[in-house]
Image (spheres, rainbow, N blue to C red):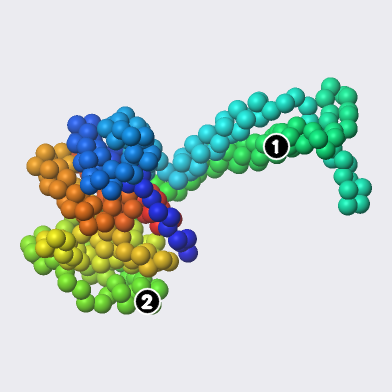
Amino acid sequence: MIPPIKNKHLYNTPSALPLYISQEIQSKIMLVIIFQPCYTRQRFKNSFGNSPKNSKNVRTILLQKGSEYPLQKKEQFLTQRIKMLEKHYNSCPDGKITIAHCGNSFKWFYNNNNEQRYLKKSERPFAEQLAIKKYIKLKMNVLETELSILKKLAPKYYCAQQAINKLLEDPAYMELLSNYFKQENEEASIWMNAPYPRNMRYPQNLIHQTIGNLKVRSKSESIIAMSLSENGIPYRYENIITLEGIELSPDFTIMHPVTGEIYYWEHFGMMDDSNYVYEFANKIKLYARNNIILGENLICTFESKNNPLSYSTISNTINQYFG
């Protein structure tokens, strides 16, 4: 159902960052990300040169991830691809190539302004350029057709997607749908339902109902749980792990349904609180020191009072890591 995930670099996330927090908090988070232990900073050096302090470049990368619907991402990709091909096409030589086949042999012919001449084998580099030009033209036609179809279908897609988003953000529907989204994969189901050390602190805060009678601490966590189940992705809620002698309970410990790799998903829901951001920073550093890397095997989403987490952002995040 879902192809194996490719390694994602640290600078690919946090995916929801641009939508859910202020510029001031964004800057604080980017400083946390940039000034990771040296082995994570090296990822920035590999991507941005020798200066990981270039926050403009980092912010550009962050703003490009996770804020669009899938069709918008596809449309942007096609538009950029067409522009790139147009630039290459315009740099190609004038004229075009045709090839005459005769049994197992063939001859190249150069055509320009209604004139044709034979191309010698010694002119192969020129023939290659003309062949590339022809391919690019055909490829552009394919992409332009795809882009045209995409633009026509986009309004219907957005309307349908918003309808399902609205349904799955309604706690009453979530409760009724919980049994439907139970795991079908036997191995994943065994892992998900096996006993595990779980955070039992502050049980009075476990008030939000989600899949399989599981209660979580926030509405956003309940939507994440529903979305993971909807996509057939097994998880454990607040599974305790120990790092450097410190017990942590990531919101969701996730098993990739294809590769079996373990991922951690932390949702940070008070990003307009400076003390909370400080605790977030320390947690990310602790994870990084133990090879749990933001953007690779650590998923983070964010929200503030004025910008709650939406189902569409959760869906995009799942698609980014497991799609």
Q: Which residue is mark 1?
A: 132
Residue furthest to the right in view is 102
Disc 1 and disc 2: Cα gap in Å? 49 Å
User: In the displayed structure, would residue 219 be above or below residue 203?
Assistant: above
Q: Is residue 70 visible?
A: yes
Residue at 66% in and 30% down: 89
**Within-10-Å neighbours for mark 1: few <14, some 14–19, many 20+:** some
Residue picked out by circle 2: 187
Q: Are marks 1 and 2 in contact (CB under 8 Å)?
A: no
Quarter of the C terminus within the rendering: bottom left
Q: Amino acid at mark 2?
A: Glu
Q: Along the horizontal axis of the image, is 42 left or right of 159?
A: left
Q: Residue at x 30, y 33 (%)?
A: 51
Q: Position of residue 128 (x, y in %)?
A: 73, 37
Where's residue 238, x and y in %?
19, 64
Count of residue discs: 2
Is residue 9 shown left or right of residue 266? right
282 sits to left or right of 110: left
Tell which of 14 and 18 is nearer to you: 14
Camera-nearest residue between 310 and 173? 310
The label on residue 203 is none
Task: Write the residue at 84% across / 29% down.
Answer: 111
Tell me where residue 293 appears, x and y as whole percent. Answer: 28, 52
Can see residue 210? no
